[in-house]
Amino acid sequence: VIFDGYVVLDGLLTAEECDQLRCRMADIVDGMDVPEHCRITFSTDNDQLKDQGNADYFLTSGDKIRFFFEKGVFDDKGEFTVPRERSLNKVGHALHAHEPLYKKMTHSPQVQGIAKKLGLQSPVILQSMYIFKQPGIGGEVTPHQDATFLHTTPLGRVMGLWVALEDATEDNGCLWFIPGTHNSGISRRMVRTQEGYPLTNFVGQEQAYDDDKFVPAPVKKGGVVLIHGQVVHRSAPNTSDNSRHVYTFHLMETEETRWSPENWLQPTEELPFPALYTT
Ligand SMILES: O=C(O)CCC(=O)C(=O)O
Ligand SMILES: [Fe+2]
C-alpha cells in the first residue's frame, strides 16, 4: 500500500528507452493532422461551435490517438502562432493500444512487476497520455484527484504511473502532492450529462488547498511516480527553457470493482480496457 499516496521510483526506463519514446512521439507530431475544430477561425458566432467541437473530440478520444493543444497557439485565422511541435499540451488517450513502442513499455515486465508487488490481481489499462509541458508555455495543472475523472466503486482501485522521459524538476513543472490526501474521499466527479452540451459536468467542487501543503516530487529521466487515484496533486506552469515530457497511464484493479458508467472514458468495442498482465 502506498504510504503518502505517491511514490517516486528511479530507473524504470533507461535513457535510451526514454529517447526512443520521445523520437516516436516527434514522428507522430510530424504526421499530425491538425483537428478541424482547432482550425475554426475566431468570431463570437463560432465560439460555441468550437467549444462543442472540442467537447466531441475529447469525449471520443478514449480509444484513439488525439491531439490537445496549449491555449493561444492558434491565431484568428487558425494558423499556428508557435512551431507545431511546441503547440501541444498532450496526446491521448490510447497510445498504449495503438503505438507498439508505447504498448511494449506499458506492458513491460518492470511495470507488471510493480503492479504485482502492489498486489494488483487483474489490472487493466484505462488510458494513456503523453504530456509535453512545453518550455515557456506549458500551462499549470490545477489541484485535482485522478478519481475525479476515473471514478470507481469502491474508490482506491485506480493508480497512475507517470514516467519521466526527461528530468522533471521544480523549474520545468514537476508534480506536487499533498501527502496523505488519498485517504479522505473525493471532492468532485466529472460525469457525462444525459444529453446535449456540455457533454460533461462536475458534481461537487474541488476544495481550496493550502499552497504550502504541497510537496514537490522531482524525478530523474527514466523514473516513475506512482500516483494513488485519490491523492491531491498539481503541477506548475513551465516557465523554464526546458520541456518536461512524460508518458503517463492509469491502471485499475478490476477485482470487485465497478467502473462508473458516468465516467467520460468508457471501454469501446474497438478497445475494451486491456489487461496489464499480457504482452
Ligand atoms: O503532468 C502533469 O503535469 C499532470 C499529470 C497528472 O495530473 C496525471 O498524470 O495524473
Ligand atoms: Fe492527475
Image (cartoon, rainbow, N blue to C red):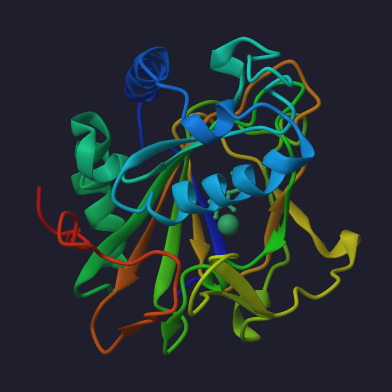
> Image quadrant of residue 120?
bottom left
On screen, 67 above or below 196?
Answer: above
Query: Image quadrant for the N terminus?
Result: bottom left
Q: How many marks?
A: 0
Residue 94's x, y, as percent?
31, 46
Q: Is residue 204 visible?
A: yes
> Residue at the location (75% across, 30% down)?
238
Quarter of the picture for ligand 2?
bottom right
Q: Position of residue 35 (x, y in %)?
A: 46, 30
Q: Identify the image quadrant of residue 203.
A: bottom right
Q: Is residue 78 left or right of residue 107?
A: right
Q: Residue furthest left?
A: 279
Q: Is residue 8 above or below residue 240?
A: below
Looking at the image, the residue that sits furthest to the front is: 45
Instruction: Give how far across and how far down residue 243 sits, in percent.
Output: 63, 22
Left or right: where does residue 234 sit relative to residue 158?
A: right
The answer to whether residue 5 of the structure is visible from this angle is no
Q: Say above or below: 76 vs 90.
A: above
**In-front residue for pair 52/140:** 52
Q: Nearer the viewer, residue 66 or 96?
A: 66
Q: Is residue 55 above or below residue 10?
A: below
Q: What residue is at 77 percent from the left and 30 percent from the top? A: 171
Left or right position of 128 against 228: left
Name which residue lies at 50% across and 29% down.
221
Q: Position of residue 267 (x, y in %)?
A: 26, 65
